[in-house]
Image: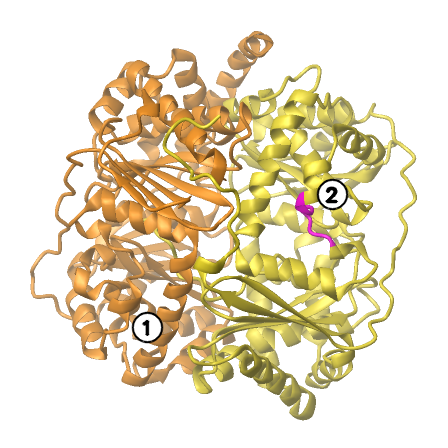
Chain colours: A orange, B yellow
Amino acid sequence: MATEMTMKPMIRTLCAFALLSVAQLAHAILPIEHWRTSTGAKVYFVENRGLPILDVSVDVPAGSAFDTPAQSGLAAMTNGLMRLGAAGMNEDDIARALADVGAQMSNRFDSDRGGLILRTLSDPKRRNQALEVMAGVLSAPAFTESIVEREKSRYVSALKEADLTPDSRANREFYRLAFGKHPYSLRSSGEADTVGKLQSDDLKAFYRKHYAPAQAVVAIMGDVTRKEAEAIAEQLTRALPKSDGQRLVIPEAPSLPAAVTRMVEHPASQSHIMIGAPGIRRDDPDYFTLFVGNYILGGGGFVSRITEEVRQKRGLAYSAYSYFSPLLARGPFVIGMQTRRDQAGQALAVVRSTLREFIDKGPTPEEVVAAKQNIVGGFPMRIDSNRKIHDYLAMIGFYGLPVDYLETFVANIERVTAGDIKAAFARRVDPDRLVTVVVGAGHDQTAAAPAAASR
Amino acid sequence: MTALPKILFVLMLTCAGLPVASAANAPADDVAVKDLANGLRVIVKPDRRAPVVASMVWYRIGSVDEQGGITGVAHVLEHMMFKGTKAVPAGEFSRLIAAAGGRENAFTSRDYTGYFQTLHKSALPLSFRLEADRMVNLVLSPEEFAKEIKVVMEERRWRTDDRPQSVMYERLLATALTAHPYRNPVIGWMNDLENLTIEDTRRFYEQWYSPNNAIVVVVGDVVPAEVFALAEQHFGLIPSKTLPLRKPQDEPPQLGLKRLTVKVPAEQAQVLMAYRTPRLTKPKEEWEPYALDMLESVLSGNAAARLPQRLVKTDRLAAAAGASYEGVGRGPGFFYLSGTPAQGKTAAEMEQGLRREVQRVIEEGVTQQELERVKAQAIAGQVYQRDSMFFQARQMGWLEAVGLSYRDENLFIEKLQQVTPEQVREVARKYLVDDGLTVAYLDPQPLSTAPARTAPPAGIRHGN
């Protein structure tokens, strides 16, 4: 009660912050330039001369959703092994050429995307050396048999280790149950037995089919001119394998027919709990509504309902959260937490009733105001570094979002109402058709129905 | 998909090497610093790339200052700092920061405790008002403590108890050190947490939280003089305290090799070796810590560095191998080597492989080319770090909190550039020796034979 009293005057002051930051954004956001390379790759570029740094990435639809169950892990391995030998350079040549100029090249890999990200100093000498290596790795990876064998052994041993951990087990069960036969059910890293069977030729074939320029997205951020950026985009995509013209798509993920609850025995001191179902696509019209709604439900850290109920009021968990992971097809909606095993039942009941209450009644108008204040007021922090802007460029390009995505972000958030959130959650999250996975139970058990405790 | 597990090959240690300093523009040049009359140090670095500030308060207090029986209290207090003052009740701190569009959290280490917000620059007064308030007015209610200590125990289970490598690291330090409090984990031993009281926490707060034991760091779109005035307004009237005497608790010399085995449910064996080394105390005069930092990089600073190149790729002895130098802090320094044996290889073979590489450095030294490469990486790393306001603030706060100066950042990069191949060889010869070594083996146990813990299943029926 005392809390409510002190909140009121503050809210007015803080609205001023929010307005101020929006006003400043109008000229603070650098315009995104967009074009296509001669081979058809899409390029997104922001020039920023503030730091002598260049960030460049190239992404293609080559994530684990393009795996088959029999070859689960092929996409990840292809992406991971490109840098271990390419264009006449062996893996050490590549690593040394990058390190000698202080460049950092990392892999991007998830269910949708496969790609490479480069960060380098922007002076021409260092930049050119780093870009030359990146172009070679993208265009002519070798996938040498002896390297494939060695890496397979390393991947398999890491997978076996992961398979013993409760969080990895929970993830695996959750995706399997939530996505059934859809490829999002496949673990992005693959399984020990499927990875163990992959051959160099499999990697080469996957690479040729997926690392083509037609669906490639190049994101460039930093200390180069438009003209230099054009040359860089050409250099990185010119020699990518010719596409057969077939567009790579991921099928839509079906909704769950019914609730499933799976308990997995594990000796860990905590139970790892995941609840959820297929959620939304990245281009879903409900995206911003659900984004604001989920902030209130379980995305807003210490001020979200799930954290309040599970952690602040009851001390049941260190972290408890919910999120949507929007993808090319419908990615998951997930609620997750870890709690001492003997109180897993209580924690589950709390989280289920919190979700049901939220879906039945929706957020309060005050919660919506507070959520928007945070998201709008916090928008400058989303784009306060080259790296963050670069990540946005790559995401906007890959998911085909409008180039004014950042300019319109705040307005899209402001538009959301409590009624919109209630309606969107009702459309997207059915509390009677969720997967529940608890790893760290006493005994294995699968139930077709949700727990009675949720009512 | 962020939720899918990533394959982790590297052994993760919660330790940092030497900070790398900036190249193109010396980073500390445009930094302004002011000490208030009550002893609070305020450090401001303008960065006008976005209308944002990173605001931090660091206390020179960490688990190293805990006495026996209350391990973990520094971290528990960090949690309790969000649980209310008279003016700002429990939960309100986070709500106010969130409503201002901010993000916030806190961290506790062996040497320091830090609190931070990133905010729109216009919200800096809010950050200062709230931080100044909880520096002196914390309520510490028994009800909130009873809940939060449970949260911290969950954190310990999650961070340490169910993670084989964390358990190994915790037990290694407890074995390597005899007297120095670095032997205790920052999160505290579970039994100490179970018996910790609110009075323990209050005593710690009253002894150590004061402006003369704190540093405020602000990086962002600000004018230093205005930040100083704002700090004076919010923190200036808080009285300083006489801090308790800090006993050095120096670790006696190690008298020979120590070994331990950690049996936990896991798939793979692991080896973790810790050599006692010096730490950085006089950044201008000393050279050994910089040479140890370069040795770390030559061994594992890039994918073609010695440990991954030889042990993983050429010999195929390891699934992963790395080195890490922990040389900045108030307590003893360590140089770590770690390895995960490849399938079919044993922990003993892994240890031999790591030792072979140490021996090679001692006998043959390192090449000028290897050093040039890792120096180039260090210079670039310093430039990259300027892309993050949060990181810049953390770097300066950290140096001040461990008793060095934010200015030393400039010095570090110069000193690293001066390291010679002979110096790298010299520190390997001097410090990577058995008499100062502790070796831990993780001995993997099958899940099924793990000791049963609490009996009842985590049922889907109502709990309590």
The structure residue drawn at horizontal position 44% and vertical position 82%, both measured from the top left corner, is: B313
Q: Is residue A153 visible?
A: yes
Which kind of residue does numbered mark 2 sit on?
Ala
| Residue numbers of the magenta segment | B184-190
Residue at x 79%, y 33% (from the top left corner): B200
Binning the other alpha carbons within 10 Å of mark 1 as few (below 14), some (14 to 19) or many (20 upward) gives many
Q: In the shown orientation, is residue A294 left or right of residue A99?
A: left
Q: Measured from the top left, where is residue A194 in percent x and y?
A: 24, 67
Q: Which residue is mark 1?
A: A81
Residue projecting furthest to the front: B455
Find the residue positioned furthest to the bottom: B364
Q: Residue furthest left?
A: A245
**For this view, does A289 lie left or right of residue B320?**
left
Q: Which amino acid, by three-letter code, is at mark 1?
A: Leu
Name the chain letter of the residue that bears numbered label 2. B
Is label 1 in a helix, a strand or a loop? Answer: helix
**Quarter-of-image position of residue B89:** top right
Q: In the shown orientation, is residue B9 left or right of residue A6?
A: left
Q: Nearer the viewer, mark 1 or mark 2?
A: 1
Q: Position of residue A407 (x, y in %)?
A: 34, 33
Query: In the rendered image, which residue does mark 2 sit on?
Result: B32
* Image point (69%, 40%), residue name: B193
Query: How far from the left and from the top, in percent, is residue A125?
Result: 46, 73
Name the residue nearer the viewer: B435 or A381: B435
Does the magenta run of residues contain A303?
no
Q: Is residue B270 shown left or right of residue A326?
A: right
Residue at horizontal 28 percent and vertical 62 percent from the top: A190
- Identify which residue, A32 or B1, lies in the foreground: B1
In the figure, residue B261 lies in which quadrant? bottom right
Marks 1 and 2, how far apart in space?
47 Å
**Res B2 seen here:** no
